[in-house]
Image (cartoon, rainbow, N blue to C red):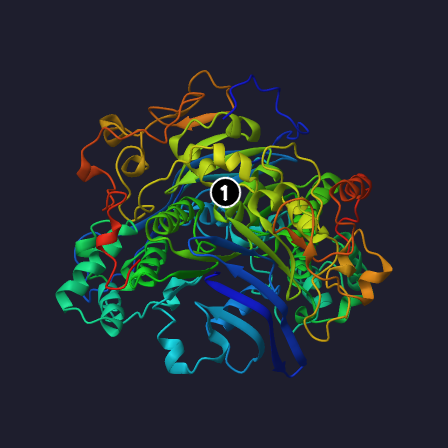
Amino acid sequence: MTTQASSPVSGPARGGDVLLRVEDLVKHFPVKSSQLVHRGPRDYVHAVDGVSLEIRKGETLGLVGETGCGKSTLARCVARLYDITSGRIEFEGIDITRLPASKMRPLRREMQMIFQDPYGSLNPRRRVGSIIGDPFAIHRTASGADRKRRVQHLMELVGLNPEHYNRFPAEFSGGQRQRIGVARALAFSPKLIICDEPVSALDVSIQAQIINLLADLQSELGLTYIFIAHDLSVVRHVSDRVAVMYLGKITEQAPVEQMWAHPRHPYTDALLSAVPVPDPASLDRRERIILVGDVPSPINPPSGCRFHPRCPKAQQKCVDEVPEFIPRLGDEAAHLTACHFPVADGEDISKARPAISADLRVVESSIPEGSLTGISGGDGP
Amino acid sequence: MALLQVDDLHVSFRTDDGIVEAVRGVSFDIDPGQTLGIVGESGSGKSVATQTIMGLTRGARVSGRALFEGRDLLNMKPEELQQVRGVKIGMIFQDPLSSLHPFYKVGWQIVEMIRLHETVSKEQARARAIDLLKLVGIPQADRRVDDYPHQFSGGMRQRAMIAMAMALSPALLIADEPTTALDVTVQAQVLQVINRLQREFGTAVVLITHDLGVIADVADEVVVMYGGMVMEQADRMTTFAAYHHPYTEGLLQSLPAYGGERARLRPIAGQPPSPINPSPGCPFAARCPYVMDRCRTEMPPLAAAGTELGHRSACWLPHDRGTREGLRRKVIGQSLPVSAEA
């Protein structure tokens, strides 16, 4: 990691007033019990467990974390596709947490989602023009020739040929189908678009086309994005700020260049070091932090800091106390980390070993290097 | 001598829409202990090529040769192939859940695999299964050996698959997108396991992936495929730093730069070609910023390029390094058509 003093956040200083505010959001899902007669307290999946966020107008917030960390659930809660367990969501200063469906409907036009699977989110039996025109039909804002004109305008906006109005989804390639999804989301000039892995299913050359499209639309229409992706190089490219989630909590949040230059949470550090970059020379130089084990179950998340069973720097305090989410090691106010023992600049944690007892951490069975030959069968090399 | 030598492999399928020419004359070889990375986008033919070599493409029309330890895999009888597949050539696929039987314990599946091909007692086979699970980093392997596949997480299943593929110490491991479904942290674990097995057993690995980062991490030699053909082949450093083919260039340019500023990305314009009735010219011609008239009618041969030994490129552009570099500066200097539709 570079230790040189970083220049002020590079890239355009986007971000004005707060568009969306999330306070202490909690979403628990009950676990279906296989017992006929239910005994004892019910189990819950702690999908999102106390997340607070602010998103400013015109910015892109990247949301990253491993499978099951709760990033998609958080996004769906924000869009009110799920009812939340507790907490508060404000959109443009209006508390939408318990808004009834009738009051929510006009707000839905301003908050749209784009999904990962462009195949799964388009009805194969309907023509593209009518799919993109759906929002106009549902909200009864345009019909007939007017609707067609507006749909064709949207198709042009996202780089589709408006003459393909009457084609079926199957006649489009993967990248073009994602453009259809983008066009549909743009129908009502929304303020916020939640992109849930929008380019993960696409080949790299097509992925780059969609990322450029989203960037163009943002600058033309002043859109705000929440961008969820597991590809960290994509997140780095598109985001102004990044939040890292682990087991339902945000562990670190920072302006994008800060995050990459000074990752404070050992989890962020491990995540960033695990990305294979397409540059053999830098890969060979880099110390990689390999985490042990998998993400624990969100039904009974670990005590204290939830990352402690896998953390190379874990100590007893991490087991006992939930770390505060505050600036650490003299970071700027926008760089927040929930860790008792944050990673200092230039510190190499790839060789660090946790100082907690073995039954509190994930331990892998292993065989010492060089002793494998005993395993191979009769005609092994 | 090469461990596996593939010569002029063609694979086509008859479909309702016409004949799909999935692989059109692919050649490569791999030495013992080497890692060959095959990279390409969907539809490039990278998976079909390797599946055909393993006899897993039923109903396909196949021609060419695939010599493994001197014997042609494409001409083997099914019984003969069974003595090679899984024994001398291990396989790992993207989705481990569909490769592990849900009804049987993970350990039992490894034990059966060993006992099918070797005369060892159940106890010996079980001990080896536990060692294999330990080897791939399954926690508490002596207990987890009696778990069912659904009790394993995604990363653990993939590692169990590797354990099974390595059970008979194959000379070659074919890994088709082995980490695509996994998170980056788990991907790093799995790549580390494959790397260690290779170091200690001297296994050769064919790694098929669309992820250039993974290729940069583990491959010794890289084959870049497009439209069922090999576009370029070179060692790892050359592929990333001194590539010749415009498609390789396009792939690398499409990626968000890892350390760089947030410039606009440079996607490859247009869409991949249809595998039905491919044009006689270069399959990349329609999307290539360097395209010349000749490219549309005549497919260039895979010929020596640049200064590195073994670097080959199927492109009509000058193969001399300096001239190619001059052209690159000229073309990349202009603005490429972005978010254009074919």
B48 left or right of A136 in image: left
Q: Which residue is mark 1?
A: A276
A190 left or right of A261 in image: right
Q: How many marks?
A: 1
A56 left or right of B149 in image: right
Q: What chain letter is assigned to the residue under label 1?
A: A
> Residue, x 52% and y 26% (percent of image)?
A261
Crowd around label 1: few <14 · some 14–19 · many ≥20 (10 Å): many
Of A181 and B284, which appears nearest the observer? B284
Of A78 and A355, which appears nearest the observer? A355
Q: Residue furthest front?
A: B1
Q: Could you tell me residue A327's position as x and y percent?
A: 44, 21
Q: Amino acid at mark 1?
A: Pro
Q: Secondary structure at mark 1?
A: loop
Q: Could you tell me residue B339's position as x and y percent?
A: 75, 51
* Residue B138 shows in the view: no
Q: Compared with residue B58, is residue B222 higher up or lower down, i.e. above or below? A: above
Quarter of the figure with the C terminus of chain A: bottom left
> Residue, x 44% and y 21% (percent of image)?
A346
Q: Could you tell me residue A352's position as x and y percent?
A: 31, 29
Of B64 and A102, which appears nearest the observer? B64
Q: Could you tell me residue B212's position as x and y percent?
A: 56, 48
